[in-house]
Amino acid sequence: MFRHQKELQFEVKVERPDPLFARQVQEVLGGQFGEMTVMMQYLFQGFNCRGEEKYKDMLMDIGTEEIGHVEMLCALISQLMDGASPEDQEAAAKDPVTAAIMGGINPQHLLVSGLGGLPTNSNGVPWNGNYIVASGNLLADMRSNLHAESQGRLQVARLYHMTKDEGVRATLRKMLARDRYHQYQWMAAIQELEEKNGVVVPATFPGEAEMEAQPEAYKFWDLSEGNESSEGLWATGSAQDGSGDFVYVADPVPQGQVYKPEIPPTNIHHDLDAVKVPLKK
């Protein structure tokens, strides 16, 4: 059960209208790494969680917080649009550099949402459920969550430097702080799960089951020009689970055969055999 509370998690109060910035904020609302994505990702992971109750409870806690962040961003976008007439919005887009980069204001804020937030990114592309990851494997999902929070915080930080509105910045600072905590949180969960089950996903498919392929688990293949990649721990160190040492392969050669596919039947219409079928009179 969910219950809505009227107060926002943190204060949202802008100093002046800025329709162009409202369009930019749409990215962290309905973009690939926006608040709608992490909201749905954490909630679906929580809904489907079959592991220890503490993981489900944590996922539901953070997923529900992200619902509040979606509401905050909608409030932020609305305030950035408030008091800005269509004429004012056109004037704000007269700077040719801004207009060229941003394409002006988002017309959907006028035509579709009535000066409110939208479930779209900054270019008006609708939010997509394929953005979320909810695999049922806790370690795989927690790593995906860390990635999502890393990308999301990066985008909010970039937005922070795109405005001088101190009210907007105050809101973004709170969101940046929460995104920082969420990175800590997922790193702590990842560490705990790795200590339980090992660092490789899925733990239920052990390396020993790979049999003759086991040596391939430690080789770094240099497949691009230059050999700078040989200097990294991925080429010179040891596997994180202590099961073996990495090997740098400077000049790898193919180990498979030249594949020659069979020509398909004529009725598949690939026209590979170049046989022309005469027309009947």
Image: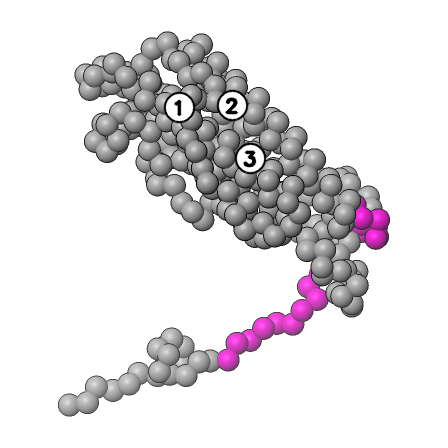
Instruction: Find the distance from the CA under tag 1 to the CA under tag 2.
Output: 19 Å
* Residue 133 or residue 122, whichever sits in front: 133
Magenta stretch: includes residue 251: yes
Instruction: Find the distance from the CA under tag 1 to the CA under tag 3.
Output: 18 Å
* Residue 259 or residue 154, whichever sits in front: 154
Badge nearest the viewer, 1 or 2:
1
Q: Quadrant of the C terminus?
A: bottom left
Residue 148: give its label. none
What amino acid is labelled 3 in the image?
Asp
Which of disc 3 and disc 2 is earlier in sequence?
3
Give the percent coordinates (x, y) of residue 168.
43, 15
The secondary element bearing badge 3 is classed as helix
Q: Residue pushed farthest bottom?
A: 281
Residue 61: give its label. 3
Task: Identify which residue is drawn at 37% across, 79% down.
Answer: 268
The relative height of residue 62 versus residue 86 in the rendered view (above or below) is: below
Give the percent coordinates (x, y) of residue 253.
71, 61
Task: Identify which residue is drawn at 73% across, 39% down.
Answer: 191
Residue stretch rendered in magenta on the structure: 240-262
Q: Residue pushed farthest left?
A: 281
Magenta stretch: includes residue 243: yes
The relative height of residue 37 versus residue 154 in the rendered view (above or below) is: below
Q: Sort mark 1 into few (<14), some (14-19) or many (20+) by Cα contacts within 10 Å.
A: few
Give the side of residue 99 with respect to residue 245, left or right: left
Residue 175: give its label. 2
Task: Identify which residue is drawn at 84% across, 52% down.
Answer: 244
Q: Which residue is mark 1?
A: 6
Which of disc 3 and disc 1 is earlier in sequence?
1
Badge nearest the viewer, 2 or 3:
3
Instruction: Find the distance from the CA under tag 2 to the CA under tag 3.
Output: 16 Å
The relative height of residue 121 versus residue 139 in the rendered view (above or below) is: above
- Pointer 1 with pointer 3, Cβ within 8 A: no
